[in-house]
Amino acid sequence: MSLEIMSRLKQSILFLILTGLFACTHPEPKIQLQSGDLLFREKSSENISEAIDQVTLTSGETHFSHVGLVEVTDTGVVVLHAYPEGGISMITLKEFIYPKGDSVTVIAYRLKEEWQKGIPSAMQKAHQMLGKPYNFSYITSDTAHYCSEFIYLAFAAGPVFELEPMTFKDPATGNFPAAWVEYYQKMGVEIPEGLPGCNPNGLAASNKLKKLGKITL
């Protein structure tokens, strides 16, 4: 190996080392959340979380199974969401990122500027729904709401999001996954295939949102 090649190789190695050191000492700045931002939580190991992601994938290839609404208060950032445990409630950002103590990837999205004027009324509507129970049937209701339904209703005056025919079938097989069959059998309800609804992956794919990035504490 010639001296010239060895010199270039050493320079390349030094550059890579310095680049790595710079990245470690200058991490990317944390995202400054604003009221009205949406937090999408990636699927967890829970069966229902996996089932939601399996049948709601979009061309954006996101893997979200839950969504919450950010509110910035005088005491910190809180998240309003609809969840099986607690129904529609307000929790801390830490509780949203670490459900049941497990760390879950959370990606923040923000309404594009032309849609942000509707945020104050959306926050007001969201507060009016606090305390309502969780909608376990996923059939649109006036008395109980699931996570993406809660978000849809909060911004309905816009309207920002739209309802679309729901499907519970695995796109790869065209069949209902066993998790959904068992879920609705236990409820004694037919699978609401084709009824209007929404889901986290569908909301995230909206062209009215822009992706901010991963949320860390």
Image (tube, rainbow, N blue to C red):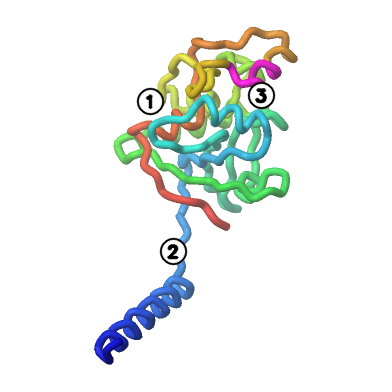
- Label 1 vs label 3, nearer the camera: 3
Left/right placement of residue 51 relative to residue 36 reads: right
Residue, x 41% and y 48% (percent of image)? 212
Give yes or no for contact between labels 1 and 3 (Cβ–Cβ under 8 Å).
no
Give the residue number, with chain letter if any, for mark 3: 134
Q: On screen, 107 above or below 172?
A: below
Lower sequence index among marks 2 and 1 = 2
Q: On screen, 98 above or below 61?
A: below
Q: Which mark is residue 158?
A: 1
Q: Residue most toward the left?
A: 4
Q: Nearer the viewer, residue 209 or 4?
A: 4
Q: Residues within 10 Å of mark 2 (few under 14, many from 20)?
A: few
Residue, x 35% and y 85% (percent of image)? 10
Q: Amino acid at mark 2?
A: Glu
Q: Main secondary structure of the magenta part?
A: helix
Q: Nearer the viewer, residue 208 or 46?
A: 46
- Label 2 vs label 3, nearer the camera: 2
Q: Where the C terminus falls, by quadrant?
A: bottom right
Q: Which mark is residue 62?
A: none
* Residue 178 falls within the magenta-colored stretch: yes
Left/right placement of residue 217 relative to residue 31 reads: right
Q: Amino acid at mark 3?
A: Tyr
Which range of residues does the magenta coloring cover? 176-183
- Label 2 vs label 1, nearer the camera: 2
Lower sequence index among marks 1 and 3 = 3
Disc 3, SS: loop
Residue, x 66% and y 24% (percent of image)? 134
Left/right placement of residue 123 relative to residue 104 reads: left
